[in-house]
Image (spheres, coloured by chain):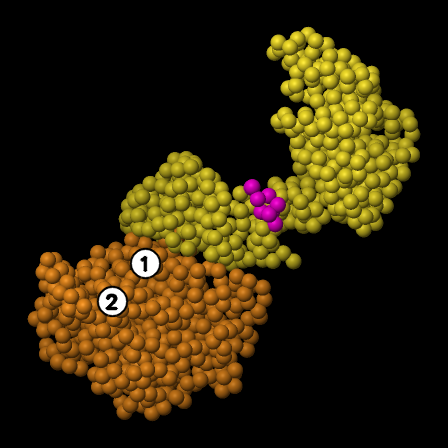
Chain colours: A yellow, B orange
Amino acid sequence: MGGKIRALAVLALVGACCLRAQPAGPGELEKHLQQAQIFVDQEKYADAARELRAAVAIRKDIRGAYYQLGFALFQTGNLGEAGRAFTKELDFQPPDAYSLYYLGRIRLQANQRQEAIAFFEKSLAAGEVLDVRRRLGSAYLALAQGDRAVSFLEESVRVRLEDGDLHYLLARAYKQKGNAAAAALEFDAAKRWNGKTRTEMEALTRLNQALTQNNQSDAIEATRELHNSSDPDVLLAAATTLGRAGLHQEAVPFLEKSIRLQPAFAEAHYNLARAFIALREPDKAQRELRATVELRPGFYEAEALLGTLLAEAGQSEQAIPHLRAAVQLRADSPRLLLLLALQYFEQRYYQDAIDLLIKCMSIDPANPEPRFLLIQARYRNLEYEPALKLAQETLRLFPGNPMAHYHLGAQLNNLSRLPEAKRELEAALTKDPKLLEARVMLGDVLFKIGEPEDSLTQFRQALSEDPKLVDAYAGIGKALIQLKRYSETAASMKQALEIDDKLPALHLYLSQAYRALGQIDDAKREAEVFGKLNAERAKARDKDVERKYM
Amino acid sequence: MRKAWTLAIIVSCCIFGQRWFERQPVAFAGTPVFVDVTQKAGIGAFRNVQGGDPNNKPHIIEVMGGGAAFLDYNNDGNLDILLVRGSTIDNFRKKGGDAVCALYRGDGKGHFEDVTRAAGLSASHGWGMGVTVADYDNDGWQDIYVTGYGRNFLFHNRHDGTFEEVAAKAGIQGGQWSMGAAFADFDRDGRLDLYVANYLDYPLEHLPVHDSSCNYRGFSVFCGPRGIPGARDAIYFGQADGTFRDATEELGIDPKKFFGLGVVVTDYDNDGWPDIFVANDLTGNLLYHNLGKGKFEETAVLAGAAFSEDGVEQGSMGVDFGDLDNDGWPDLYYTNSSFQSNTLLLNNRDQTFTNITNPARHGSSTYLHVGWGTSFGDLDNDGWEDLFVVNGHLYPEADKFAMGLKYQQQPLVFMNNHDKTFRESGAEFGLTQRWKSRGLAIGDYDNDGRLDVLINNLDDGPVLLHNEMPRAGHWLLIRCVGTKSNRSAVGARLTLRAGDLREMREIKAGVSYLSSNDLRVHFGLGTHPKADSLEIQWPSGLVQTFQDIRADQMLTLEEGSSRAVVGQ
C-alpha cells in the first residue's frame, strides 16, 4: 500500500512538468508519465518501467521519476537497474526517503545487512516511510544487536499492533536480549493476533483504509463494528488506528473497554495515557502510565513518557526514577539524557548530572545545550576550574551563541576575573540585547568592579525589559545603598516588594534606607521581616547540599 | 643602580612637592619590606599544634586556633610575644591538652627568649584558641587572658615575671568553646570588663559523626560549623574585688547563639561609650551599640554590618576598627571565607556604615582567600592607616579542589591611597610565601617606629616580620596610663594633628583574629617632624591636649598629668 500511495505522486509530477512547458515535448512526457501511473495501478510494473524510461529520456531532471522507475523495476525483480534508478533519484535534495528505503531492501536481498541498515537509517532520518522501522529491527536482529532491534520493533508494533509477525519478531529480539518475560508476552501476542477471527481483522483493515482515504461513513461503520468486539487486542488495535488518525477522543472508549476486559493489559494503559496526553489531560495520563510501568516494568516508552510528564509538571524528584529507568533501557536519546540530567541538576544530584551530560555531549556534539547545563552543574558541584575551562571551550565551538558568552562571563565572574567577565557579558548582550540574565550579571560585575552608577544603568535596563525582574531590583537596591541615594532606594524597594515580598535582600535594603532617612521604626520593622525571611533562606540553603543519587 | 633609583625618587619628590610621599608607588626591586626574622628572633621552635595530623583534619576544632599577642608583661618598655597553641584530641582526652601558650620575653633589639616555664605558664594545659592582654585589675602590670576549648585562662601578673592562673576565681573561666575576647570598660567605671565570643557547642566526647553532609567537593572533610549548634557569647563586668560578674543573660547577649569568632570593641559612633562588634562564622555579625552604662542594643542589621551586600551571612573571622579616611570616625574591616570578599565598611557618622569593599579595591583581591587575622596600622608611617591580612584555607584538601584555591595562602597588605581606596602590595613587599595563618598581631617590637607583624600559623611555626619599609615617615609611639580610667587606658581615644594630617586611634585590647596588638598607640606622621597637637579622651571622660610633640620618639602619658614622659 505504501508503494501505491507514493506512486500517486506521479500525477503531481505531471502537473509540474506541464506548467513549466518544457521545449522537449511536454505533451509526450505527460503521456508517458500518465501511462506509467496507470500501469503501476494495474501492477503492470514492466510496462510502467518502460514508460518511465521513456519519460526520463525526454527529461532527466524530473524529481520522483527515477524513484518510480526504481520502484517498478524493483517489483519486476530487476534489482540492479532499480538500484541505479533509486541512486539517481538521490541526486535531488533533500534525499528521498523512499529511494533510500528501497536501496536498503536491495542490499538486504543481497545479504548486505550493514549496508542495508545504513540506508534504512538514512531513510528514517529523511522521513518515516513504510515499514522502515520493522526492516531496521529485523536487520539488527539478524546482526544480533538486540538493543537496537528492540527499539525499532517496539515502535513498529505500536503502529501495527494487529501484525502478529511483528510481535513474533519483537519476541525474538527480547529473547536475544535475555528478557524472557517480555519475550513470552510478545510470543503470546503473536499467537493471539495470528489466531484472530477473519471478521475482526477485516474490520480493522476497513477502518484503516477508511481513515486513510478520509471515508467517514466507512470509518463510522467499522468503528461501530469494532467497538462491539470483546477482544482486548482488537479494541486496542482499533484505538491505535483511531489515534494515528488524530481521533483521540474516539480512541478512549476502545481503550477503556479493553482495560475493563483485561485490567492488566499494559499496552492498553499506555495507549490510553497517550490519548490523554493528546487530549491535554496530563493527570489522567500520569495515572495510566503509572499503571503501565507497574504492570510491565522495563517498558521504555512508558517510563520515558511518565518521566517527561512529571518533569514538565515540575516534579523532578518523582521524574528521576522513571527517566533513569528509560535511560537504563536505552541510552541513545540525547533529549531524554538531557531531560534526566536537568532533573538531577534541579535536585542537586550534581555528579549524576555531570556524568550524564558528558555522555549527552558525546552523542549530540552539535547541540550546545548539554554543555551549558554541564557548565552550571560543574559550577554547582564547586568544580569552578573545570566549569571555566568548559565554558571557554564551548565559546570556541559556538562563537556566535550569546549564551556561550554568558556562561563564560558567569564563570569568570565566579572566579572574580571581573574585567574578563565584563567583556564576555557585553559580548553576549551585543549578540542578544534581550538576554536579561547577562544584563543582570553585568550589573553585578560592574558593582563589584566598583562602578555602582554603571551597574545601576544595567539593572534598570534589565528592569525596562522585564518590570517584574526582582533580581534587577535587588541589584538596584544594592547600588543605590552604596551611592547613599536612600529615598530612591526606598521607592524602588517598595515597588519591588509589590512583586515579591519574600526576597530577604529587598527588605534589608529598605530597612537600611529607612534607617538613613531617620524612619527608625520602619527600619526596625523591615529589619525584622528581613531577619525572618533570611532565616528561612538560610535553612533552605543548609539543605541545599550536593547529593548522590542512590 | 641603587643610587640611580634614589635619584629618581628625589627628582620626583621635587616635582610633586610634599605629596610624593603619599602617592609614590613603591618599587622595592627585590628587597623585601617585611623581613622574616622568626628564626633570628628565637621564636621559630614554637608550634601551634592543632590536631594530630597537619594533612588530615577530621574535626573542625583542629583548624580554628590560635592567636598571637604583642605585650609588655614585665614593664621594661620592650614588647614580648605570646603565642597560643591548641592540642590534639588524644592529648586533650588523656591529659587535658597541651600547654595553651608560650611566652617570649623581648629585649627590644629583636631577640626573644622563651620564658613560658619560668613565667609559670607551661603548667596550664588545655586547647588554646585566642588571647587578649590588659591590666584587668589596675595594678600596673599586664595580665593575659587565653581563650580555649572547654575553659579559658586568666594569667594574673605577679609583677615578678610570673603569672598565676585565676580564671575560675575571677569568674571568667567559661566552659564553652571560646574564641575571640576583648577587654574594655563598657560601663566606664574604671574597671575593665570582658566580652568573649563563643563558637560551637562541640562536646569532644560526642564528636559529630561523619556522614554524607561532611563532604566538600567529594572529599570527606570535617563536619561543621553548619549543622552544629552554636555557643552563646558571654559578657562579664569587672568588679572592685578583681572578679567579674556574668551579665550575658541580663543583657540578652547573643540569644541565638551565633558562631562567634573575632571581637573588637570601639566607640564607633563617637558617643563616648565603647561598642562591641562580633564577627560570626556563617551567621550574621553582631554590633552591640552601647546605650550608656553598659546597656546594649544589637544594631548590626540596621547599621549595615551584619551581612554581605547581598544580604547573605559570611564566614567572618578577624576584625578591626580603624580610621581609613582620617575623618575621626572608626571604620570597620573584617575578613571572610573564600568566595566572599573581605568587608570594608566606611563609617557614615550616623551609626551606620556604607560597604565600600569594591570601590576600595578589596573585592577581587581577597575573594579567593580565606581571611583570618587582620589589623589596621600605618605600615609606612605616611599618616594613613593601612591593612594587613593573613590567610589560609580550612581544608588540607583545598589543593585538590578545582576551585582556584590553595590550602596555604599569601598574606595581603593593603596600602592606603588616601582616597578611600587601597592597593594590594603584599607581593611587592616581598610577601610571597604561603602559610596557613590564623592569628595576627602588630606592634613595634624593636621600637624603631615601624609596625612589625606577628603571625601564628596552624600546625606550623610562627612568623615574625620585621618592618623595613624604606622611606617610612616620621612617627610617634604613645603609651597611655590610666589613673581614674582603667590602667591600660583601653578605650582611650587619641587624636593627632600634624600639618594637614588628622589621625585618630583608639586603644583596643583584643582585635584581629583571636589576637591582641601592642597596647601602645602608633602614629605615622609622614613628612611632619612634629605633631602639632595630640588630644586624649580618656575613658573617664577627661580630655587632655598636648602641643608640639617632636616626632620619632616614644612617650608615656599618664591620665591627669600634663607631663609627657619620654621613653616607656
Identify which residue, B521 or B426, lies in the foreground. B426
Q: Are marks 2 and 1 on the same chain?
A: yes
Please give left or right for residue B452 compared with residue B398 in the image: left
Corner quadrant of residue B271? bottom left
Which residue of the protein is positioned furthest toward the left in this rendering? B548
Give me the chain letter of mark 2. Answer: B
Numbered circle sitting on residue B362: 1
Q: Residue at x 49, y 65 (%)?
A: B400
- Judge depth for marks 2 and 1 and give the one in front: 2
Identify which residue, B89 or A56, lies in the foreground. A56
Residue B288 among those drawn in magenta: no
Residue A363 among those drawn in magenta: yes
Q: Which residue is mark 2?
A: B29
Name the element at disc 1.
loop
Q: What segment is highlighted magenta in the picture?
A: A359-367
Numbered circle sitting on residue A258: none
- Above or below: residue B127 compared with residue A309: below
On the image, the x and y values in percent for residue A457 come to: 33, 41
Mark 2 or 1 closer to N-term?
2
Residue neighbourhood size for the residue with mark 2, other residues' Cα within 10 Å, grouped as few (<14), some (14–19), many (≥20): few
Residue neighbourhood size for the residue with mark 1, other residues' Cα within 10 Å, grouped as few (<14), some (14–19), many (≥20): many
From the image, which quarter does the C terminus of chain B lie in?
Answer: bottom left
Corner quadrant of residue B524? bottom left
On the image, the x and y values in percent for residue A135 come to: 77, 36
Q: Is residue A484 visible?
A: yes
On the image, the x and y values in percent for residue A255 come to: 79, 33
